[in-house]
Image (cartoon, rainbow, N blue to C red):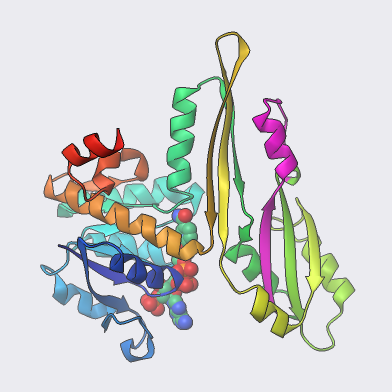
Amino acid sequence: MIKVAIVGYGNLGRGVERSIKQNKDMELVGIFTRRAPETVKTEGAKAYTMDHLKQKKGEIDVCILCGGSATDLPAQTPEWTHLFNTIDSFDTHAKIPEHFAKVDQVAKSNQTTSIISTGWDPGLFSLNRLYAQSILPVGQTNTFWGKGVSQGHSDALRRIEGILDATQYTIPNKEVIEKLKAGENLDLTTRDKHYRECFVVLEEGANAEKIQEEIISMPNYFADYDTKVHFISKAELDQNHKAMPHGGTVLHAGTTHDNTKQVIEYNLQLESNPEFTASVLVAYARACVRLAKEKQYGAFTVLDIAPKYLSNRTDEELRKELL
Ligand code: NDP
């Protein structure tokens, strides 16, 4: 049995607790949180303070770190990799090389193994970009996200004065996807690839027109996109817009000899982003333990891991059943 600890218990942490129940070779040691453990409502697992984690050394094969990428993981992954094998879902793409270097140094000097930036993007989408570009070097890769809820954009809406609550959906431009699949060579801008749709609840007396203008002109978040804003009641938002669906497509349109068209498409349609991301983390936790057993210490990403390490089946079974 692989003994797992969940470090940090939000949406992703809850997803990992659920996923471990579906993996017969895994056992959950506990949930470790910065909050008072008795205030954290788990789905059956015992919660401990994060300080207590140190005392569990020897009882844990791998810690799945479920903190946020903005401020938790840059500190927590190096900190816990001193003592444990770790997995994280660090998704600030531009800072991954810096995060990797820091965790690699800690892991190598403490003989631990860490797989960082797992999940679907970064993660499974990264792998598919690599496969596509290596197999069809003449071609163009595009990644489309959605339809799905972007937590970052929803948070940005909630920070606007006069907005009580909001949900933002990222929607891919299907026409553009079809044209790329048909082999058209397009020069795409940010605006061409995705739309944004916002469902917003206003505070009493707020000026809808002014807020709409503030949303669609917000730099980095909405200004570069076509954005539709709907003002709705709190009851409607709570009833229809509180789930966390997501997904997307990695599309690589390439050519081989004599302009022969070849298209690779990898698509995810997720009813629950955190539950799916958690399931990816759990599979990579298995790979992490296996690497550590082989004394392969240091930091790794999904690009470094042999696919068979994700599975709990033997090499022989995999050769027989999947090839
Ligand atoms: P949450 O905000 O739900 O949780 C983050 C942390 O906040 C938790 O670990 C928890 O730490 C703390 N927390 C959670 N709920 C509460 C609360 N009610 N009050 C106070 N603190 C709380 O984030 P998610 O779980 O949704 O996402 C985590 C990260 O996963 C994201 O930042 C994102 O980077 C990453 N992600 C990566 C993906 C990928 O494809 N690579 C896809 C999706 C997400 P503690 O228990 O210690 O208080």
Question: Which quadrant of the figure contains the N terminus?
Answer: bottom left
| Horizontal arrangement in the rendering, residue 301 relative to residue 69 (left or right) | left
Q: Residue at x 83, y 83 (%)?
A: 206
Answer above or below: position of 39 versus 267. Answer: below
Residue furthest to the top in view is: 258
Residue furthest to the right in view is: 209
Answer above or below: position of 272 versus 203. Answer: above
Residue furthest to the left in view is: 58
Q: Which residue is drawn at 57% across and 49% down?
A: 248
Tell me if residue 176 is in the magenta stretch.
Answer: yes
Give how far across and how far down residue 148 sits, in percent: 61, 59
Task: Indicate the quadrant of ligand 1 in the picture.
Answer: bottom left
Question: How many numbered badges does the structure rendering display?
Answer: 0
Question: To which quarter of the image does residue 175 belong?
Answer: top right
| Horizontal arrangement in the rendering, residue 193 relative to residue 118 (left or right) | right
Q: Which residue is drawn at 35% across and 48% down?
A: 100
**Residue 61 visible in rendering:** yes
| Horizontal arrangement in the rendering, residue 155 relative to residue 195 (left or right) | left
**Residue 113 visible in rendering:** no
Question: Which quadrant of the figure contains the C terminus?
Answer: top left
Part of the protein shown in magenta:
164-190
Question: To which quarter of the image does residue 166 belong?
Answer: bottom right
Question: To which quarter of the image does residue 262 belong?
Answer: top right
Give how far across and how far down residue 279 sits, in percent: 37, 59
Tell me if residue 284 is in the magenta stretch.
Answer: no
Give how far across and how far down residue 98 sits, in percent: 40, 48
Answer above or below: position of 69 versus 28. Answer: above
Residue furthest to the bottom in view is: 38
Q: Which of 69 and 270 is in front in this view?
A: 270
Give how far across and how far down residue 305 sits, in percent: 29, 41
Q: Which residue is drawn at 18% across and 39% down?
A: 315
